[in-house]
């Protein structure tokens, strides 16, 4: 499976009444999984900030493209919880009872224990209460848990993407392995901490930890570029600009669909690179805000 590259970091909430044990797990898990220790009481108190997706109230708010985009924008500074890792043996309520009360269809739920019966685990999985079970006495517990969380994060965004069918499809460049490398490159070279998808996931604005704009990323298909060139907007474009765009060395980067006359396209050209996937795409990393 390929991790969708566009998504901002999410939080993995670790829930256990043994704080020392769960803090030790958090320390051992890879930092990119963003493990966060959560006291069981926080669930019962209805922590709206942490569990913004975990309530029935917020389950059905993202049924349109604009509302889903707003969701991503609203959660840039406060990454959403994608995965719950809950211990079974807690008092006065066990982990399965807690997970029954998490109503979000998106959040992935992992149960950990060495006490729960096999029959109850199977029943919980079949009924959708949990998505995964990992035994605490597994010899490779941390590695198995880390792998389970990574798969859970993928499933979280795939579930969320079902509300946005135009985005989640087999031919989307952001599901290609190369796009993951692009995002990693930007994070490393520019120390980017957050990113905001705009223009229906065609553009991304990357920010540092002070929420200052660092760099922009634009991805466009060869088909889209061809249509752009052959359309009436490109009729007045100089031939040398057309050839430059066709070669993939540069692409025109516009803020919206109100395209300028082809005579001034040279003002909007940004150096680009080729992204090979099921189709051919071009991408540009630049700091311009035009």
Image (cartoon, grey):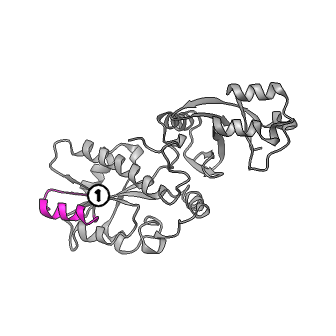
Name the foreground residue: 217 vs 209: 217
Q: Is residue 20 above or below residue 127?
A: above
Q: Is residue 88 above or below residue 169?
A: below
Quadrant in which the N terminus appears: top left
Q: Residue at 40%, 73% (x, y): give it.
A: 46
Q: Report if residue 287 is visible in the image.
A: no
Q: Does 65 sit above or below residue 259? A: below
User: Left or right: where does residue 46 sit relative to residue 285?
Assistant: left
The answer to whether residue 43 of the structure is visible from this angle is yes
The magenta stretch is 110-129
Pick the front one: 139 or 162 = 162
Q: Please, what secondary structure does the residue beneath circle 1 have? A: loop
Residue 116 on the magenta span: yes
Q: Position of residue 200 (x, y in %)?
A: 62, 52
Where in the figure is residue 269, as x and y percent of width and height? 76, 34
Query: Relative to residue 181, is residue 137 drawn left or right?
Result: left
Quarter occupied by residue 173:
top right
Task: State the residue at coordinates (19%, 65%).
Answer: 123
The residue indicated by pointer 1 is 131
Query: Where does the image place residue 166, in percent across and percent down from the top left?
Result: 56, 53
Vertical arrangement, residue 20 with respect to residue 124, above or below: above
The residue shown at (18%, 60%) is 122
- Image quarter of the C terminus: top right
Residue in the foreground of this view, choosing between 223 and 289: 223
Residue 198 coordinates in the image, percent (x, y) = 64, 51
């Amino acid at each position: 499976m390929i991790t969708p590259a566009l998504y901002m970091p999410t939080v993995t909430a670790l829930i256990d009444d043994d704080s020392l044990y769960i803090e030790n797990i958090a320390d051992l898990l890879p930092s990119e999984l963003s493990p966060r220790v959560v006291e069981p009481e926080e669930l019962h108190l209805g922590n709206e900030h942490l569990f913004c997706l975990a309530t029935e109230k917020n389950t059905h708010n993202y049924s349109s493209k604009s509302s889903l985009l707003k969701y991503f924008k609203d959660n840039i500074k406060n990454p959403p919880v994608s995965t719950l890792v809950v211990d079974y043996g807690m008092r006065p309520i066990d982990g399965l009872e807690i997970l029954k009360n998490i109503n979000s269809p998106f959040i992935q739920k992992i149960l950990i224990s060495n006490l729960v019966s096999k029959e109850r685990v199977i029943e919980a999985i079949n009924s959708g209460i949990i998505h995964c079970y990992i035994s605490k006495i597994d010899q490779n517990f941390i590695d198995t848990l880390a792998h389970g969380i990574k798969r859970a994060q993928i499933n979280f965004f795939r579930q969320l993407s079902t509300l946005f069918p135009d985005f989640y499809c087999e031919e989307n460049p952001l599901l290609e392995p190369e796009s993951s490398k692009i995002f990693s490159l930007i994070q490393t070279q520019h120390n980017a901490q957050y990113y905001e998808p705009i223009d229906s996931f065609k553009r991304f604005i990357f920010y540092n930890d002070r929420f200052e704009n660092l760099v922009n990323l634009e991805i466009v298909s060869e088909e889209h570029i061809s249509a752009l060139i052959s359309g009436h907007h490109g009729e007045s474009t100089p031939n040398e600009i057309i050839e430059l765009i066709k070669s993939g060395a540069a692409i025109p980067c516009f803020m919206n669909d109100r395209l300028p006359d082809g005579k001034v396209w040279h003002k909007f050209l940004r150096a680009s690179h080729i992204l090979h996937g099921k189709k051919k795409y071009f991408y540009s990393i630049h700091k311009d805000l035009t």
